[in-house]
Amino acid sequence: MKPLLTERLTIRNWKETDRPLFHLIHSDEQVMTFYPFRRSRVESDEIFDTWRSEIAATGLGGFALALRDSGECIGYCGLKIPRIEPILPEGTVEIGWRLAPLFWGRGYATEAAERLLEYGFDTVRLPEIVSFAVAQNHRSTAVMNRLRLHRDHTGDFDHPRVPDTHPHLKRHVLYRLSAQDWQNRKRAG
């Protein structure tokens, strides 16, 4: 996949120089508030290599976000397969994001996700894109609402990979956007 551009961001595959930032966003207490695990550098590097390979092979994955003016990597936004069947059917594609705290509150996640919705629907031709988060993760659900994803109350679920030792992180809310809704939105301007 060639890099995608927004007004302020480049959405691209990961570079070796991005490894420290990648580890930060997978280990920082503030960033990982709604996740049960913090990743060691070794674990982070394994995920980094996997994501980089997936993007190269499929054009989907957790893409690096870099500031266009400086090239500085600030986090990720991605179109990924969550693999939590039967809660979400096989082949479901999820949009998600994670930024270093220094870059929170500036609209970068929304800007990147909007561009990836366009890529997912117009280029990859996905029939639907979903997003989900811990019910109390109001920062992420605010992004979902700004993206005009539709809340699916009937789809809320307890995440199967969240251990019982973290019951406050189990319940997830589900949002959806269909290709038809995307096309209707584009036609309406």
Image (cartoon, rainbow, N blue to C red):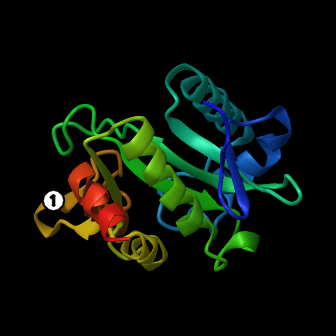
Q: Residue drawn 36% across and 62% down?
A: 186
Residue 143 rendering spot, x and y as whole percentages = 46, 72
Residue 20 rendering spot, x and y as whole percentages = 81, 46
Secondary structure type for disc 1? helix
- Can I make out residue 176 in this image? no
Give left or right: position of 50 versus 141.
right
Q: Residue drawn 67% across and 77% down?
A: 106
Residue 42 versus residue 112 in the image, above or below: above
- Can I make out residue 122 in this image? yes
Residue 77 rendering spot, x and y as whole percentages = 56, 52
Quadrant in which residue 148 is drawn? bottom left
Q: Which residue is mark 1?
A: 155
Quadrant in which residue 183 is drawn? bottom left
Q: Quadrant of the N terminus?
A: top right
Residue 56 versus residue 88 in the image, above or below: above
Q: Quadrant of the C terminus?
A: bottom left
Q: Residue furthest left?
A: 154
Q: Residue furthest top?
A: 57
Kind of residue at badge 1: Gly
Residue 93 rendering spot, x and y as whole percentages = 34, 42
Quadrant in which residue 81 is drawn? top left
Q: Residue drawn 62% across and 52% down?
A: 76
Residue 18 versus residue 140 in the image, above or below: above
Residue 124 versus residue 27 in the image, above or below: above
Binning the other alpha carbons within 10 Å of mark 1 as few (below 14), some (14 to 19) or many (20 upward) gives some
